[in-house]
Image (cartoon, helix red, strand yellow):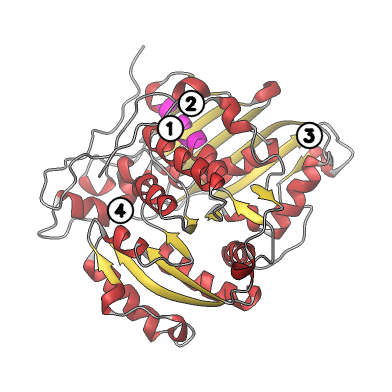
Amino acid sequence: MSESKQSSISRRDFSKRAALGAAAITAFTLPREAQAQDTIKIALVGAGGRGTGAVQNAIQAGQHSGAKVELIALGDVIEETAKGAVRGFKENANLKDSIKVDDSTTFWGLDAYQKVIAMKPDYMILATPPGFRPEMFEAVVNAKLNCFCEKPVATDFNGIRRYMAAAKKSEELKLHIVTGNQRRHQKNYVETVEKLHDGALGDIVAMRVYWDGGLPHARERKPGMSDLRYQLYNWYNFCWICGDNIVEQHIHNLDVANWVLNSHPVSVIASGGRSWKPEIEKYGNIWDNFSCDYEYPNGVHVFSYCRHLNHSYDEVSERAFGTNKNFHGGVSNCADMGEGGLNPYVQEHVDLQNAMMGKGPYWNQAVQVCESTMTAIMGREAAYTGKRLVWDEAINSDLDIFPKNMSWDADMPPAPIPRTPMP
């Protein structure tokens, strides 16, 4: 994988964007020929469950945007995954008429994404594991393609800088970028956050955000699997590729905090650990719990907690606490002042398609999702190191955990399980 060193990024550079919270929406419209388009060609990189689900969401979205959506190419690092996804699409009666992929446009291997990009779809769907996203998003932007990119968008600070540089370029090119933080397209969230911004709870003085649930998967190595093949198969359990659970999952809740507060943290202190997972291969090197105290501008604190604990109390939620106790008791779950709408996983593609056809506002969430990913990574590193991390220092650190000289037969033992150092 190639590397790209980017220039320093300040907190001010991040926080001047997206004041309305629904990402960077402006009055920009596309040229007339794009507005007249009624067929939208999409292509997928990353053909696992989230990727194939996103294709279905995109096709369903066409029923609401008025677009005829066609999948013209597909790629994955694993041959059987790529071929199996195409086969599954064609066997689905609700999808098969929209599937225009054949053997010549089905790709696999570590360079599959380059071949898919070369097909020049109207928009790309990037649904690979997070560690790959900085390089792939950079390639999509360099090809001047619109994109639906899943979150999070990096697993270390080096990846953040790389993605951010591409995000800024995508803004300059006026590309449409929608990301997988679907709450920003969920009607009851959108309406509630707008009211919070309008002062419904007065000044927001604190928030707390939770992602408490079970471990998504932990897979045993199959006979003959190389280190890379196994870590891709069991990707959720290795930090270089997933970012740990605070990054891969809890980013949703942290993104809501950034959205409500129209900012990102100034600093964070955190703790956590690995309380129940034995040190065996299938559990990789990620932790199972994080507790973070994020400080935002004006002394506002966001208390963040996430964990993996099967068969336990589960809660995925956000709470904002305001000074106006006469309205909702001064508390909102960030979705309780709005009405329900379309499935947000579909709505995010509706918004992207409408924008591309000139039927809706311009969407570019690339900087915003990078900021939320950075928030999560900073919490993880504060917990791993036991240090208070400051945004402006952390974002310019040299942390780079992505493997170098990646190949199918290379020895790639995982990094040790992080241990917070003793004082």
Which badge, 3 or 2, comes first in the chain's sequence?
A: 2
The residues tagged by marks 4 and 2 sit, at their Cα atoms, a distance apart of: 25 Å
In magenta, the rendered stretch is 374-383
The residues tagged by marks 1 and 3 sit, at their Cα atoms, a distance apart of: 27 Å
Image quadrant in which the N terminus is located: top left
28 to 96, vertically: above or below: above
As rendered, which of 60 and 203 lies closer to the eye? 60
The residues tagged by marks 4 and 1 sit, at their Cα atoms, a distance apart of: 20 Å
Q: Position of residue 269 (x, y in %)?
A: 51, 23
Which badge, 4 or 1, comes first in the chain's sequence?
A: 4
- Residue type at mark 3 is Gly
Of the numbered discs in the image, which one, if any, rests on residue 322?
3
Which badge, 1 or 2, comes first in the chain's sequence?
A: 2
- Residue type at mark 2 is Ala
Relative side of 398 to 34, left or right = left
As rendered, which of 40 and 370 lies closer to the eye? 40
Q: Secondary structure at mark 3?
A: strand
The residues tagged by marks 1 and 2 sit, at their Cα atoms, a distance apart of: 8 Å
Image quadrant in which the C terminus is located: top left
Q: Is residue 379 magenta?
A: yes
Residue at point 39% right, 23% down?
Answer: 397
As rendered, which of 64 and 5 lies closer to the eye? 5
- Numbered disc in front, either 1 or 2: 1
- Residue type at mark 1 is Arg
Q: How many marks?
A: 4
Relative side of 371 to 27, left or right = left
Q: Position of residue 76 (x, y in %)?
A: 29, 63
Can residue 79 be seen here? The reply is yes
Q: Secondary structure at mark 1?
A: helix
Residue where numbered disc 1 is placed = 380
